[in-house]
Amino acid sequence: METAPADDVDDATTEAELEGRFGRPGPPIDRRNPFIIGLLGGLGLLLAYTIFLGIRNAASILVLIFIAAFLAIGLNPAVSWLRRRGVPRGGAVAIVALVVLALLIGGIIALIPPLVTQTNELIKNVPDYVSQLQRNQTIKELIVRYDIMEKVTSAVNAGTVGNAVGGVVGGAKLIFGTIFNTLTVLVLTIYFMAAFDRLRESAYSLAPASRRARVRLLTDEILTKVGAYMVGALAIAVLAGFSSFVLAMILGLAYPFALAVVVAVCDLIPQIGATLGAIIVSLVGFASSLTAGLVCVVFFIIYQQVENYLIYPSVMRRSVKVSDVAAVVAALLGVALFGVVGALVAIPMVAAVQLIIREVVVPSQESH
């Protein structure tokens, strides 16, 4: 009986191992094949569109997360200050959270009594205001010339009532939505403050080890500027509240301290806060007298211009070290591009960009 040579046996074994259980593997796929290129390109576009849809659908939640993270960064210096005085991190976070919550509740409590009582007073005084305006010869001529009374009467119909009911329902949804968003931001802010150090170290670990120390220093400086921005915003809010208190005392308005607290709390809200506080104080002014209401309107129009173009840039220049022009331009662009969130992060973002340009971009260009 003949036996196969050893070399033939080895070749057969190697061939069987290469082929495996299901045969020999074929040649690799040609990645330059037009079909493969088109398929991969289509899958990439589909994946990008899916990510876009996911971000768009979750935009409102992402905005709340971003605001909470920004507030946590801004409040972290207060937590660090308490920790340096021996307070555990959990206790420091609880103290800061309770102070913020007390300010919000205090603002709401201060807002409700004057808003309710003065709204009732305003409703009672509306007939007197109308009669005062009608006695004015110029106003009377305008009413007759443009037929204002007939237009107002024709506007009050079933459709107007239906729109009013729809507006009430929409207003209720807006109120409950605002409460939910506020609570969500508060809870997330507390979580972020509690885990701030751990989250920051995790973010630093993503940087290359050779550049981690420099990234840490630059990022810590940016976080410090965010905290300084929060201090500056609080100073501006306190100044707005004090100005409103002085105005209320001069005009003899009811609840002057409560109005000052409301204006200060509202002034912390970017974009719409100052206007909201001005409307509340003006409403109380009109409830007192027509002259007081007009004085409040004129005062807040002038004060908001002074705050936006003089006080705000000056405070930010001292606290965040951002030039006046950069502060004004950043605030305007932030509001125009991203609304409330843009107004919130405009100044710290400009400070961060300036720091990166000064410490990274300029030295890199100089080395070349």
Image: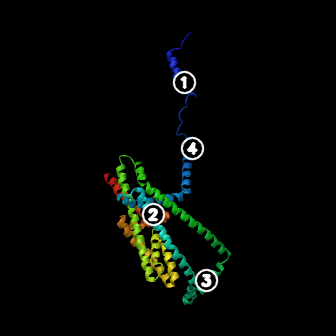
| Amino acid at pointer 4 | Leu
Q: Position of residue 302 (x, y in %)?
A: 44, 77
Extreme residue in the left direction? 367
Q: In the rendered view, does 15 fall on the left or right side of 366?
A: right
Question: In the image, what residue type sits under mark 2?
Answer: Leu
Considering the numbered disc 2 on the image, is that residue within a helix, a strand or a loop?
Answer: helix
**Residue nearest the viewer, comparing 347 with 99:** 99
The label shown at residue 16 is 1
Picture quadrant of residue 317: bottom left
Q: Nearer the viewer, mark 4 or mark 1?
A: 1
Q: Is residue 247 visible?
A: yes
Which residue is depicted at the point 54% across and 78% down? 117
Q: Earlier in the sequence, mark 4 or mark 3?
A: 4
Q: Are marks 4 and 1 in contact (CB under 8 Å)?
A: no
Mark 2: few, some, or many residues within 10 Å (few <14, many ≥20)? few
**Which residue is identified by label 2?**
98
User: Residue 39 bears which disc, if any?
Assistant: 4
Point out the tag, 1 or 2, that comes first from the N-terminus: 1
